[in-house]
Amino acid sequence: MKLSRLAAAKRGATAGTIALSATALLLSGCGTPPSAAAAGDSNSAGASDYLGCIVSDSGGFDDQSFNQSSYEGLKKTVADLGIKMKEAESTTKADFEPNLNQMSNAGCNLTFSVGFLLKDATETVAKKDTKGHFATIDDNEISLPNVKPVVYDTAQAAFLAGYAAAAQSKTGKVGTFGGINIPTVTVFMDGFADGVKYFNEKKGKSVKLLGWDKATQQGVFANTFDVIQEGTKATNNLLGEGADVIMPVAGPLGQGAGDAILAANKAGKDAKLVWVDSDGYLTAPAYKSILLTSVMKKMGDAVESIVKDDKAGKFDPTPYIGTLENDGVALAPFHDLDSAVSADTKSELDAIKKDIISGALKVESKASPKTK
């Protein structure tokens, strides 16, 4: 396993263990579920010779975020189905195509490329390796018969997080910042903004969101997913402006945000953190004491279901879109801060979730994934 090597080389962090559901996600709702067979598919293989592969983006498999969730999902699939596994970690963008070529040359039945930034490299390799299958996590821009996009309408779950953050704020200011200004980041920020706005409308309040303006699509970005100190810097700036609940949408930079909040609280503040992609209580346990909740993409469940279908000869390139309705996205429990969240707020969040699922409440972001 390469986790300890990359952690030591990049930041010395120890990744937590993701607790994944024992039951694979039923990929239903938006798009055709993977169980719908593609005509003429010949990529099926028995457990003994099926090779499932995965390539990370530059965050690596110990990012305590989407790379790790996907990686742990494939590891669980190996244990559940008895398949073989091959992995390649990327440290820079220059690694993407060589790592994907490595998987192709190894004869991988299905290769997961993790992250929007791998789009171009995945498309290049998939065009050459027409017999191999690929699944692109967090990208929906490739239209090839051997590529299945796996994307998430995280605006829905982030709406709930924005409402919860506004309800918990004591300063009347909450904040967010992104790693890089790309759709898979801004979709979180849009949902969070709308959740804060909805809280204000329903409660007659005026909680202010710092770090993102949905109308102009302008906000605070670190312009990196790799330099953790930039997460600390962005968070300290938001704290200095008065935000007391902050949601970093920046992969590993969430650690920098958590460190900044811990330090600020030690100095007398009372700020909280909202994690993204995975349940930070499980993947980033160092921040348990300040973690309000997490906006989760259930990537591990999707990984296992897609492998199961591919192994059975039922690969389908129709995009899968995770939503609240199909449990592809979710708001994590409040865990240690549960007692700090009022029964009224919890009840309101339950009602909002039901309204989003029913369509009574529309959550819209220009970055939300669309079916083709």
Image (cartoon, rainbow, N blue to C red):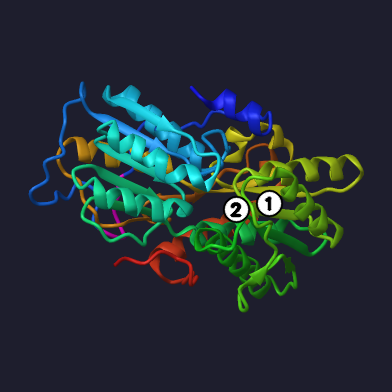
* Magenta residue span: 26-31
Left or right: residue 211 versus residue 363 is right
Crowd around label 1: few <14 · some 14–19 · many ≥20 (10 Å): few
196 vs 311: above or below:
below
Q: Could you tell me if the residues under marks 1 and 2 are in contact, i.e. CB atoms within 8 Å? A: yes
Where is residue 331 drawn, in percent x and y? Answer: 54, 50
- The part of the image, by quadrant, that contains residue 102 is top left
Give the amino acid type for the residue marked by disc 2 in the picture. Answer: Lys
**Label 1 belongs to which residue?**
342
Residue pictured at 70% horizontal, 48% vertical? 273
Residue pictured at 74% horizontal, 61% vertical? 174
34 vs 68: above or below:
below
Give the amino acid type for the residue marked by disc 1 in the picture. Answer: Ser
Where is residue 216 drawn, in percent x and y? Answer: 63, 78
Where is residue 99 drawn, in percent x and y? Answer: 41, 38
**Label 2 belongs to which residue?**
346
289 vs 351: above or below:
above
Left or right: residue 332 versus residue 26 is right
Along the line of sight, which residue is nearer the eye, 264 or 22?
264
Q: Which mark is residue 222?
A: none
